[in-house]
Image (cartoon, rainbow, N blue to C red):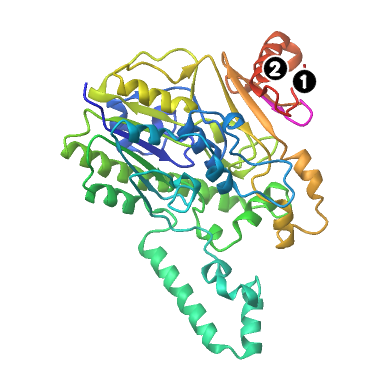
């Protein structure tokens, strides 16, 4: 067969359990229609609970333990995750596609995958359409940071300096930003419409590989979030220092589904375009997500957001693959690792269309806090009474998860203690399942290799 066109679509932050094809109640008619032509894999597991390490795994075919682009629990003054991507010496799979004659294009609403990020190298074309979401005063006009972090303090200093011109400029910019966001239906639409228009208006030489990242269901999802410091909102709630009101959480949950509906409409327009161009049938189209989203479920650490933890709602994501000529395949028993996306793509190019993503055992990893606690403390996010080292070691410790035969085990990488032990999603007791526990510990021990990560044996 001729080389198929390839489209990889990442619906950023989408957990699988909201989709009707996975038992959810979200209204996604276009995704449902697409699924009729595709193979819906039942047990996909993201390799990481946040954007950068997961995308790195998609693009390299390696777990975070292998590509080393991840957060670091031992950090004191923070890390530049982009720097780690820039310093990666291996090849991304689209670079291999370049050598096979593919025209490679990236359209992204995510600032982590942009012309300025470490994921920018050797595309034939890369473009970003994102509205950067921390929409609060100090982020709108950085030149005014010297006047103070809080709005009230900024205006007080403006008046003290008699700088009325800056007040007017500031207010005008803020008003224009709000107007722009309202026109573009932000925060329930975050640029997917612009990306789809770009794809539709592009004259793409075949064969092509197109990567798309859509951010609709990523926070913020409400005005309540938009005008607050996003880090303060998440971390203060997690630490029970200032909880997000229940009515706001309910609104966030409702808007998550509304934003998904908007995204589904854009997916429908994209698929219609592919069909009109007569390139849909012979294309390999992969729809998945880099991670899910915790929505304050009852857990050991009740949480709104993503990163840090390995709960099901954070790492169990959709995987829907339409093979060329809509070919159906037999799905093997086990779990789907998104690390195997490059392998599946290369096999499909060679007309070897089989289930190349399912394994008996899969893993997911978190290496600790994804933001610099010390920097956040200096910004006044945390009260001075908060013991940063203590919460780092008691909440934000490194974790690894293993799935096998219906069981899931998550352990604390600092001391080897069990974080989660589940069978078919239900908590079970270690003392009543000793043989299973030992088997899963063996799997984790082999997986972690020589890494400094405690697996109690």
Range of magenta residues: 410-416
Residue placed most toward the observer, 252 or 37: 37
- Determine whether 424 is above or below 4 in the image: above
> On the picture, is 165 further left or further right than 408?
left
- Determine whether 9 is above or below 371 in the image: above
Percent of width and height locating residue 250? 54, 48
Percent of width and height locating residue 361? 56, 17
Location of the C terminus (image quadrant) = top right
Query: Which residue matches tag 1?
Result: 456
Residue 413 drawn in magenta: yes
Tell me the residue at 72%/18% (across/down): 429
Percent of width and height locating residue 13? 49, 41
Residue 408 drawn in magenta: no
- Determine whether 187 is above or below 279 in the image: below
Residue placed most toward the observer, 222 or 163: 163
Which element carries disc 2, helix, strand or loop?
Answer: helix
């Amino acid at each position: 067969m001729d080389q198929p066109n390839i489209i990889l679509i990442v619906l950023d932050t989408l957990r699988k359990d909201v989709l009707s094809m996975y038992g959810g109640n979200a209204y996604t008619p276009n995704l449902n229609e697409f699924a009729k032509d595709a193979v819906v894999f039942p047990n996909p597991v993201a390799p990481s609970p946040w954007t950068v390490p997961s995308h790195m795994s998609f693009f390299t075919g390696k777990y975070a333990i292998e590509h080393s682009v991840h957060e670091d629990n031992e950090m004191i003054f923070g890390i530049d995750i982009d720097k780690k991507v820039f310093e990666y010496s291996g090849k991304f799979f689209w670079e291999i596609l370049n050598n096979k004659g593919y025209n490679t294009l990236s359209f992204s609403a995510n600032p982590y995958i942009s012309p300025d990020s470490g994921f920018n190298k050797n595309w034939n074309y890369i473009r970003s359409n994102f509205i950067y979401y921390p929409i609060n005063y100090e982020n709108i006009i950085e030149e005014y940071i010297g006047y103070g972090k809080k709005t009230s303090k900024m205006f007080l200093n403006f008046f003290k300096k008699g700088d009325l011109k800056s007040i007017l400029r500031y207010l005008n910019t803020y008003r224009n930003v709000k107007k722009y966001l309202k026109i573009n239906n932000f925060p329930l639409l975050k640029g997917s419409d612009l990306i789809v228009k770009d794809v539709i208006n592009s004259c793409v030489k075949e064969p092509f590989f197109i990567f798309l990242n859509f951010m609709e269901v990523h926070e913020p999802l409400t005005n309540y979030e938009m005008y607050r410091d996003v880090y303060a909102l998440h971390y203060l709630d997690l630490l029970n220092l200032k909880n997000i009101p229940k009515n706001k959480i309910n609104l966030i949950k409702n808007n998550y589904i509304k934003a998904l509906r908007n995204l589904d409409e854009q997916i429908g327009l994209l698929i219609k375009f592919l069909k009109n161009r007569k390139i849909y049938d012979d294309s390999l189209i992969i729809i998945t997500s880099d991670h899910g989203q915790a929505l304050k479920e009852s857990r050991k650490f009740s949480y709104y957001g993503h990163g840090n933890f390995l709960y099901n709602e954070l790492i169990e994501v959709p995987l829907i693959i339409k093979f060329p000529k809509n070919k159906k395949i037999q799905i093997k028993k086990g779990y789907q690792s998104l690390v195997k996306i490059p392998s599946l793509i290369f096999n499909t190019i060679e007309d070897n269309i089989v289930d190349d993503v399912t394994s008996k055992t899969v893993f997911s990893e978190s290496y600790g806090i994804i933001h610099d606690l010390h920097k956040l403390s200096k910004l006044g996010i945390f009260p001075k009474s908060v013991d940063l080292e203590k919460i780092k070691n008691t909440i934000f410790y490194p974790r690894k998860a293993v799935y096998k035969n219906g069981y899931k085990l998550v352990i604390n990488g600092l001391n080897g203690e069990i974080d989660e032990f589940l069978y078919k999603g239900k908590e079970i007791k270690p003392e009543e399942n000793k043989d299973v526990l030992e088997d899963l510990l063996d799997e984790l021990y082999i997986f972690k290799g020589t890494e400094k990560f405690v697996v109690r044996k």
